[in-house]
Amino acid sequence: MTEHYFTEACPAPEAEIEEISVTLRGTPHRVQIASKVFSAHGLDKATKILLEGAPAPVAPALDLGCGWGPIALALTDELDGEVWAVDVTQRALDLTRRNVPRATVAHADDAFQELSSRGRPLKTIWSNPPIRIGKEELHAMLKKWLCLLAPDGVAYLVVARNLGADSLAKWLTKKGFATRKLASKKGFRILEVHPAN
């Protein structure tokens, strides 16, 4: 079976971890990365575009599908308040804990249970969502998490145009989430999504 970045993987052995330099929203960092995690060799183009184009976040904030943690790290750079980073593999969560010690890093299921018990607590969601998990799973994931946005909260999603950014925006609007294209750059769209009231 082919392994994907959303396939369960154990934390990376120390010998497989590489340290690199990245700049996130103008702030330089040294981070640890490893294989079997999305964008295993550095900051991917889509996440870079999201970080360059998203407006200032408000806490509590969530990095949905954190990988090795670049979005969560950018959020903690700008926020003194609560930042959550969630994913579904232990390898991703371990790397994010190493790279973003100020974030609350948790498996997506556990984090959703905790956050949903608070009602609609999130003011910001930033995500480069895992399009390749398939449309049905993607839609279910987004609908679930977007329902945790506070009435005045907002999500920013980066999606490649050729992987269905425009159809995703239409689907979100149909489901009651006010959605617009905030920016378009190098074949990617940043979608601004407001909660259904």
Image (tube, rainbow, N blue to C red):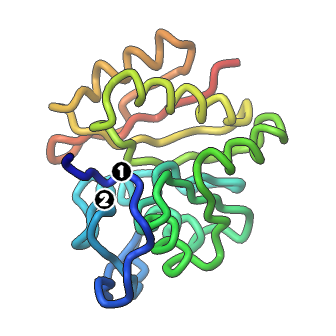
**Does residue 76 show up?**
yes
Looking at the image, which is closer to me, 181 or 188?
A: 188
Looking at the image, which is closer to me, 41 or 46?
A: 41
Disc 2 marks which residue? Answer: 38
At horizontal 41% and vertical 68% (from top left) the residue drawn is 68
99 left or right, relative to 144: left
Q: Position of residue 89 (x, y in %)?
A: 46, 57
Q: Position of residue 24 (x, y in %)?
A: 39, 72
Q: Amino acid at mark 2?
A: Phe
Residue 18's place in the image compared with 92, above or below, is: below
Residue 7: give its label.
1
Of mark 2 and mark 1, the one earlier in the sequence is 1
At horizontal 30% and vertical 39% (from top left) the residue drawn is 159
22 left or right, relative to 59: left
Looking at the image, which is closer to me, 65 or 35?
A: 35
Residue 5's place in the image compared with 20, above or below, is: above
Q: To which quarter of the image does residue 177 belong?
A: top right
For label 2, the crowd category at 10 Å Cα-Cα, with few meaning under 14, some 14 to 19 and many 20 or more, is many
98 left or right, relative to 50: right
Residue 4's place in the image compared with 73, above or below, is: above
**Does residue 20 show up?**
no
Q: Amino acid at mark 1?
A: Thr
Residue 79: give its label.
none
